[in-house]
Amino acid sequence: DAGVIQSPRHEVTEMGQEVTLRCKPISGHNSLFWYRQTMMRGLELLIYFNNNVPIDDSGMPEDRFSAKMPNASFSTLKIQPSEPRDSAVYFCASSERRGTEQYFGPGTRLTVT
Amino acid sequence: GNSVTQMEGPVTLSEEAFLTINCTYTATGYPSLFWYVQYPGEGLQLLLKATKADDKGSNKGFEATYRKETTSFHLEKGSVQVSDSAVYFCASEGNTGGFKTIFGAGTRLFVKA
C-alpha cells in the first residue's frame, strides 16, 4: 500500500482565500484523523471520523474550518476564509479501528500571507 | 481528564550515550500506549507500542515498558546514533468508544557525533 496520501504537499495562499486539503487513507482503515502542528501549540487533533462519520470535532478551532468524508477513501479539510494564524502543517492519519496505531501522511504545509 | 506528560526537550546526547525520555499518563481504564517518532519534514510514524500492563514494546533498539503502578511508559535506548535525532511523541489511546487519542507535547532529541 502507498500509505496515507495527502495533497497538496505545500500550499501558499492569501488571507481570505478558501483552502482545501485532501487525504486518501490506507485502504481498509476505518478511522481517519486530521491534525494540525505548529511550534507554538504542538500537535492538535482537529477532528476524527469512524466509518466515514465524524465522531469528535471538538478540536476544530472555529466555524471557518470544516471537514468531510464522503466515502471510505477520501476526506477533505476546508478553511474558508483562511487567516495567517492558520499557517501550520496539517496531517491526516488513518488506523484500522479505534485504539490501534495511526499511520500518518506526509503533511500539507500551509502558509497564509 | 485524560492526559500524557513527557519530559521537555531538547535533549542533547553524544553518540552511543544512553537515552531515557520519560512519559506518564492519566486515563480511565487501561489505554494502549505508543511511542511515535517524527523525522524532519515527515509525518509521525509508530516506533513501538504496548497494549496491556507489563508489556514491553521494542523496535530499532528502543524499548518501553507499560507500568500500571506508576502510570508510566518511559522510552529507552542503550546507545543512540546520530540518525536517532528526531522528535519523539508519547501517546495513549483507549479501546472504548469516545476515548480520544492523546499525544504528549513531544521531546526533541539531538545526537552529536
Image: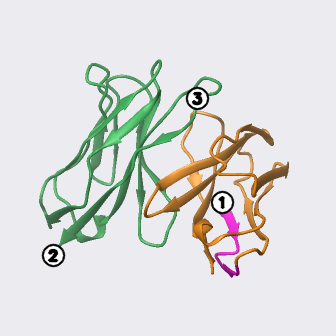
Percent across and percent down for residue B13 are 15, 63
Q: Which chain is orange?
A: A
Percent across and percent down for residue B106 are 37, 53
> Mark 1 and mark 3: span between their CA atoms?
23 Å
Please state if B47 lies on the left or on the right of B111 as rendered: right
A8 in the magenta segment:
yes
**Image point (31%, 44%), residue name:** B6
Mark 3, secondary structure of its residue: loop
In the rendered structure, which segment of residues is drawn in magenta? A1-14
Subunit of mark 1?
A: A
Q: What kind of residue is marked 1?
A: Val
Please state if A47 lies on the left or on the right of B72 as rendered: right
Q: What kind of residue is marked 3?
A: Phe
Res A83 → quadrant: bottom right
**Residue A78 visible in the picture:** yes
Q: Which mark is residue A95?
A: none
Say whether mark 2 and mark 3 are on the same chain: yes
Percent across and percent down for residue A51 are 78, 38
B67 in the magenta segment:
no
Q: Which chain is green?
A: B
Is residue B73 positioned above or below B47 on the image?
A: above
Q: Which mark is residue A4?
A: 1
Res B54 → quadrant: top left
Mark 1, secondary structure of its residue: loop
For disc 3, the marked residue is: B99
For disc 2, the marked residue is: B113
Res A6 → quadrant: bottom right
Nearer to the camera, B75 or B100: B100
Subunit of mark 2?
A: B
Nearer to the camera, A26 or B3: B3
